[in-house]
Amino acid sequence: MVQAYSLYEGSFSVDKSRKFVPFDPAVDDPKDRPGSMFIHVHPFLIKTESGIVICDTGLGHTDDQGVLKLYNNIRKLGYEPDDVKYVLMSHLHKDHAGGMVKMEEGSPRIAFPEAEYIVQRGEWEDAYSGISSSYRTEIFDVVQRSGNLVLVEGEGAINTEISYVHNGGHTPNHQAFHIRTGGEHYFFGGDVLPEPEEIFHNYVAKYDFDGRRSKELRQRYWTEGAPEGWIFLFYHSKNITMGRSQLRSDGSYKLIEAG
């Protein structure tokens, strides 16, 4: 039984200002936002034997009462933010790291006080280096003071269910995660494999630090994971957010919604 869920934060347009503006396809017209990319944001929740896991944390947008939308989505599934034991960060760009913290009585606080935040050390150092405006260091200051930060290097295991691997590609120190629990193998590739279309229409993306490496990695993950039945978690997908392979009669694999 699949025990992973999208915590869909919303759809957004992004232009050269790099601001994420909410976009509702039922109301808004893409033609009114020329020069914009349209991005969907899906943090994920996975129920494991060692506790609730969150894969990336979205932009940190809130509802009209100032409550994180991430919180609302977690509660809709019957859990509380304090149930989260691991926050797995593929990288620290603002559309992935905004929900690491929350505002409480006018001050920023860590969003998941019972969780370990798993970050590659090199990514953490790059976030403070000033190399990109996509990093919001005021968020990381809160995480650093919390005592919940766990910096890892290279590849290794968090516990018997969760492992990580430094893969680069999108950022120099991007990482991916394998979560093996409940008889399933979940793969979270972050922004190296953010959409299912990138498996079959493989291209070098301009938004990657090393687009060729990302392209090679996407093919490697599919070639390895499709025969083994991995469930792929797609952070920026507009259609299939959690997919697994299905064998065709010709011996090739197609991607279907995992359920």
Image: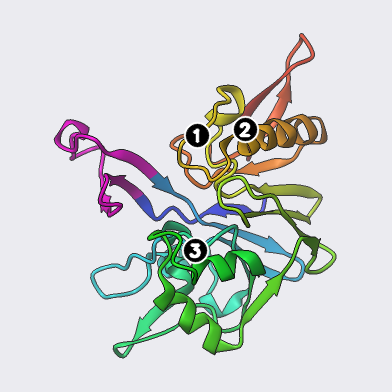
Specify whether residue 14 is in view.
yes
Q: Which mark is residue 215?
A: 2
The quarter of the rendered structure image containing the C terminus is top right
Circle number at residue 7: none
Q: Is residue 21 left or right of residue 236?
A: left
Name the residue beneath numbered marker 3: 57
Residue 27, magenta (yes or no): yes
Residue 1 shows in this picture: no
Marks 1 and 3, how far apart in space? 23 Å
| Mark 2 to mark 3 CA distance (whole Å) | 24 Å
Q: Secondary structure at mark 3?
A: loop
Residue type of the residue flagged with mark 2: Lys
Q: Nearer the viewer, residue 131 or 7?
A: 131
Q: Position of residue 229 (x, y in %)?
A: 77, 36
Q: Are marks 2 and 1 in contact (CB under 8 Å)?
A: yes
Q: Secondary structure at mark 2?
A: helix
Q: Amino acid at mark 3?
A: Thr
Residue 205: numbered disc: 1
Report x, y in % for residue 137: 43, 74
